[in-house]
């Protein structure tokens, strides 16, 4: 699906919603996503959260630390 199709489908979806609360939620979510500048999320993390995220990123380079998709799917199949 290309950008034009996505926009058209998104407009159609919005036009089909009559619930004002849902529309407000969509609006606020999209607005917050478009207002967010690069690096803003990182700046909102505490030093400890930043450290943990960097540690997790480094650990993901080691294949022994990774869990394959089928294992995760089996573990959480009741929610899928």
Image (cartoon, rainbow, N blue to C red):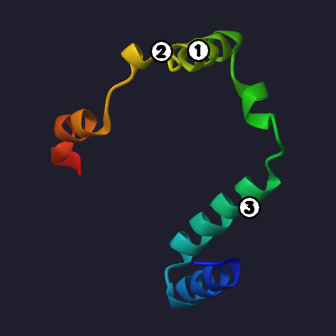
Q: Is residue 18 above or below residue 52?
A: below
Q: Report which quarter residue 26 is drawn in.
A: bottom right
How dense is the environment of label 2, judged by Cα within 10 Å: few (below 14), some, or many (20 and up)? few
Q: Is 12 in front, or is 31?
A: 12
Nearer the camera: disc 3 or disc 2 = 2
What secondary structure is found at the residue carrying circle 2? loop
3D distance between C-alphas at marks 2 and 1: 8 Å
Sequence-wise, the earlier of marks 3 and 2 is 3
Residue underneath mark 3 = 31
Q: Is residue 66 above or below residue 51?
A: below
Report whether 70 appears left or right of 19.
left
Report whether 72 appears left or right of 14.
left
What secondary structure is found at the residue carrying circle 3? helix
Point 40% across, 16% down: residue = 65
Residue underneath mark 1 = 58
How dense is the environment of label 3, judged by Cα within 10 Å: few (below 14), some, or many (20 and up)? few
Q: Is 3 in front, or is 80?
A: 3
3D distance between C-alphas at marks 3 and 2: 37 Å
Residue underneath mark 2 = 62
Sequence-wise, the earlier of marks 1 and 3 is 3
Point 66% across, 68% down: residue = 27
Q: Quadrant of the N terminus?
A: bottom right
Question: Residue 44 in the image: x percent, y percent?
Answer: 74, 27
Q: How many marks?
A: 3
Q: Is residue 30 above or below residue 77?
A: below
Give the label on residue 15, or none: none
Point 17% across, 39% down: residue = 74
Point 64% across, 59% down: residue = 29
Q: Report which quarter residue 54 is drawn in.
A: top right
Question: Residue 35 in the image: x percent, y percent?
Answer: 81, 54
């Amino acid at each position: 699906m290309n950008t034009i199709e996505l926009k058209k489908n998104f407009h159609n979806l919005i036009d089909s919603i009559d619930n004002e609360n849902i529309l407000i939620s969509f609006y606020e979510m999209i607005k917050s996503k478009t207002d967010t500048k690069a690096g803003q999320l990182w700046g909102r993390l505490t030093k400890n959260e930043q450290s943990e995220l960097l540690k997790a990123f480094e650990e993901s380079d080691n294949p022994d630390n990774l869990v394959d998709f089928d294992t995760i799917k089996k573990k959480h199949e009741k929610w899928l």
